C-alpha cells in the first residue's frame, strides 16, 4: 500500500521567508510525527500528533515553528521567518495507535529545506 | 538522560566481509530498540526491532541484532556485506508508552568492491 508521502521533496527559500511542508500519513495511522535531520546530527523530534489529543510540541525549537493536522490526516509544518540554521531534512512519520505499536513508525522520504 | 550513542561515524568494509555496527543506549527502563537504514534521498526504512523475548532478532536484508542488557548495547550485524548495503544506519530507542524515538547520530557505511 501507499507509504508516507511528503511534499515538496526539495525547497529552497530565502532567509526571512515562510515555508510550509506537507505530510500525508499512511491511511489508518492515527499518530503522526515530525523530525528534523541536520547535517552530521541525529534526528531531532519536533512535534507529535495523536488522534484528537493536544499535540506534543515539546521539540519545536522556537515559536517560528508550528504544525497542524487537519481532519486527523494530513499535516503541515510551517516555519516562519526562516533562518539559515533551519536548513535540514524534515522527516514525517506515522504509526498505529497502541502502547506498543505506537513505536513502529513509518517514515516518509523527507523534505530537504535549504535557506539561503 | 536518555541517549543513543553510535561510536563509529564512518565504517568501510570490503564486499563479502562481515559487519558489526555498534549502538549503546542510556535508558532507565527496558527499552524498545530499533535499527533503521537510510539511503541517499530516501526516508528511513526499519531493518529490525526489539520489543521483548529472544534477544537475537532477525531483520530484513540479512541483518540481525543482539540486545545485551548488561552492556546496554544493541549491535547490528551482517555476515556478508553487499555493495548495495552502503547507506546510513541509525539506531533508535523507543521508551515504550512514550512516543518520541531517540536517535543516534548514525553510522555511514561504505562498501569497497
Image (tube, rainbow, N blue to C red):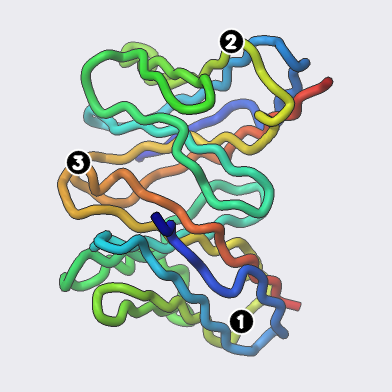
Location of residue B44 with respect to A57 vertically, above or below: above
Residue drawn at (25%, 31%), measured in percent from left and top? B28
Tag 3 secondary structure: loop
Q: Pick whichever, B44 or A67, lies toward us.
A: B44
Q: Position of residue A89 (x, y in %)?
A: 60, 61
Residue labelled with disc 3? A100
Q: Pick whichever, B31 or A101, lies toward us.
A: A101
Q: Quadrant of the C terminus of chain A?
A: bottom right
Tag 1 secondary structure: loop
Q: Residues within 10 Å of mark 2 (few under 14, many from 20)?
A: few
> Residue B113 sits in which quadrant?
top right
Asked whether, in this view, residue A29 is left or right of residue A66, the answer is: left
Tag 2 secondary structure: loop
Mark number, residue A17: none
Residue drawn at (27%, 40%), measured in percent from left and top? B95
Residue labelled with disc 2? B79
Comes first in the chain, label 1 or label 3:
1
Mark number, residue A82: 1
Among all residues in the image, which is located at the extreme right?
Answer: B113
User: Could you tell me if the residues under marks 2 and 1 are in contact, i.e. CB atoms within 8 Å?
Assistant: no
Distance, label 2 to label 3, CA atoms, is 30 Å
Q: Residues within 10 Å of mark 3 (few under 14, many from 20)?
A: some
Q: Position of residue B55 (x, y in %)?
A: 31, 14
- From the viewer's perspective, is the residue at label 2 or at label 3 nearer? 2
Distance, label 1 to label 3, CA atoms, is 36 Å
> Residue B72 sits in which quadrant?
top left
Q: Position of residue A98 (x, y in %)?
A: 16, 49
Amino acid at each position: 500500500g501507499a507509504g508516507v508521502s511528503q511534499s515538496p521533496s526539495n525547497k529552497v527559500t530565502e532567509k526571512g521567508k515562510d515555508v510550509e511542508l506537507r505530510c500525508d500519513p499512511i491511511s489508518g495511522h492515527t499518530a503522526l510525527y515530525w523530525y528534523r535531520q541536520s547535517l552530521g546530527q541525529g534526528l531531532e523530534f519536533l512535534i507529535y500528533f495523536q488522534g484528537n489529543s493536544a499535540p506534543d510540541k515539546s521539540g519545536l525549537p522556537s515559536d517560528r515553528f508550528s504544525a497542524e493536522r487537519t481532519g486527523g490526516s494530513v499535516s503541515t509544518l510551517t516555519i516562519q521567518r526562516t533562518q539559515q540554521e533551519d536548513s535540514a531534512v524534515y522527516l514525517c512519520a506515522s504509526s498505529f495507535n497502541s502502547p506498543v505499536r505506537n513505536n513502529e513508525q513509518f517514515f516518509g522520504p523527507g523534505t530537504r529545506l535549504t535557506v539561503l | 538522560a536518555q541517549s543513543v550513542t553510535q561510536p563509529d561515524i564512518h565504517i568501510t568494509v570490503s564486499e563479502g566481509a562481515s559487519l558489526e555496527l555498534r549502538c549503546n543506549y542510556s535508558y532507565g527502563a527496558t527499552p524498545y530498540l530499533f535499527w533503521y537504514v537510510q539511503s541517499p534521498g530516501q526516508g528511513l526504512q526499519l531493518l529490525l526491532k526489539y520489543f521483548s523475548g529472544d534477544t537475537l532478532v532477525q531483520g530484513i536484508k540479512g541483518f540481525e541484532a543482539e540486545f545485551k542488557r548488561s552492556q546496554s548495547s544493541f549491535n547490528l550485524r551482517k555476515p556478508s556485506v553487499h555493495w548495495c548495503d552502503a547507506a546510513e544506519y541509525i539506531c533508535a530507542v523507543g521508551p515504550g508508552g512514550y512516543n518520541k524515538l531517540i536517535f543516534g547520530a548514525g553510522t555511514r557505511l561504505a562498501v569497497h568492491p
